[in-house]
């Protein structure tokens, strides 16, 4: 894919796919098993282009959703990795809900910063809770991992009238 910046410069991103799969019984494509995106060089002195490798699910409910995304620099050094976990509902209508996400950031001397998030859903598949824990390998958790302090993104029930908060209606 070639992109023009409007000032005379352009950049190209190329994509390579592997492992295409089709479910004949369901008459449905399950997508590709993997994809590599080779990105434009950011600096003229880079000898090779950075790239992103993505592994996709090929399970019927989660087909096409990423399982793992790894980002590399032009020297083939791993910069970051994100792993995704889904809970699949096998009956029709099929559901696939993200239940966990692990993020890893790597530095040039072998250090790693790991953060973890888990997700809960109501009976309709709406995300109802996010638990986020940070910096597991550095000792400086920026978000608590326990249920009481680590809840993030939970709607707070309030009563509102004419733009004024009157009272909290939930716990």
Image (spheres, helix red, strand yellow):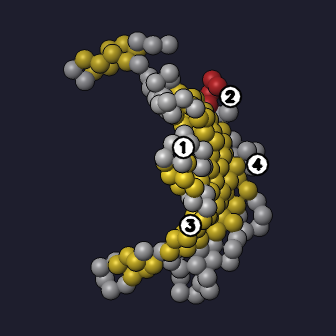
**Which circle, 3 or 4, is nearer the viewer?**
3
Q: In this view, does 63 lie to the left or right of 78?
A: left
> Is 137 on the left or on the right of 18, as rendered?
right
Which badge, 4 or 1, comes first in the chain's sequence?
A: 1
Of marks 4 and 2, which one's residue comes earlier in the chain?
4
How crowded pointer 4 is (Cα within 10 Å; few <14, some 14-19, many 20+) is rated as few
Per the model, the C-alpha gap separating discs 4 and 1 is 45 Å
Could you tell me which secondary element the residue under label 2 belongs to?
Answer: loop
User: Outermost residue, front direction?
Assistant: 25
Residue appearing at x 58%, y 78% in the figure = 49
Separation of disc 1 and disc 2 at Cα?
Answer: 44 Å
Q: Quadrant of the rendered structure where residue 161 is?
A: top left
Residue linked to disc 4: 137
Write the residue at 49% across / 48% down: 28
| In the depicted structure, whether residue 144 falls above or below residue 107 | above
Label 1: which secondary element = loop
Name the residue located 69 percent from the left edge and 66 percent from the top edge: 78
Q: Residues within 10 Å of mark 2 (few under 14, many from 20)?
A: few
Q: Where is residue 7 in the image (x, y as percent from the top left)?
A: 31, 83
Count the marks: how many?
Answer: 4
Q: In this view, does 57 lie to the left or right of 6?
A: right
Badge 3 marks a residue whose secondary structure is strand
Q: Distance between the residues labelled 3 and 4?
A: 34 Å
Q: Which of pointers 3 and 1 lies earlier in the amino acid sequence? A: 3
Pointer 3 residue:
17
On the image, the x and y values in percent for residue 45 come to: 58, 87
Label 2, on which residue?
A: 146
């Amino acid at each position: 894919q070639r992109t023009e910046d409007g000032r005379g410069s352009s950049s190209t991103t190329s994509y390579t796919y592997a492992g295409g799969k089709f479910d004949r019984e369901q008459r449905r494509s399950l997508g590709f098993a993997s994809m590599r995106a080779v990105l434009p060089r950011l600096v003229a002195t880079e000898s090779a282009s950075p790239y992103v490798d993505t592994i996709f699910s090929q399970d019927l409910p989660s087909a096409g959703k990423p399982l793992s995304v790894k980002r590399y620099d032009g020297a083939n050094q791993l910069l970051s990795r994100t792993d995704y976990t889904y809970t699949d509902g096998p009956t029709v209508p099929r559901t696939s809900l993200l239940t966990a996400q692990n993020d890893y950031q790597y530095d040039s001397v072998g250090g790693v910063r790991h953060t973890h998030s888990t997700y809960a859903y109501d009976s309709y598949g709406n995300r109802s809770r996010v638990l986020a824990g940070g910096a597991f390998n550095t000792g400086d958790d920026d978000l608590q991992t326990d249920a009481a302090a680590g809840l993030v993104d939970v709607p707070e029930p309030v009563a509102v009238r004419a733009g004024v908060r009157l009272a909290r209606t939930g716990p």
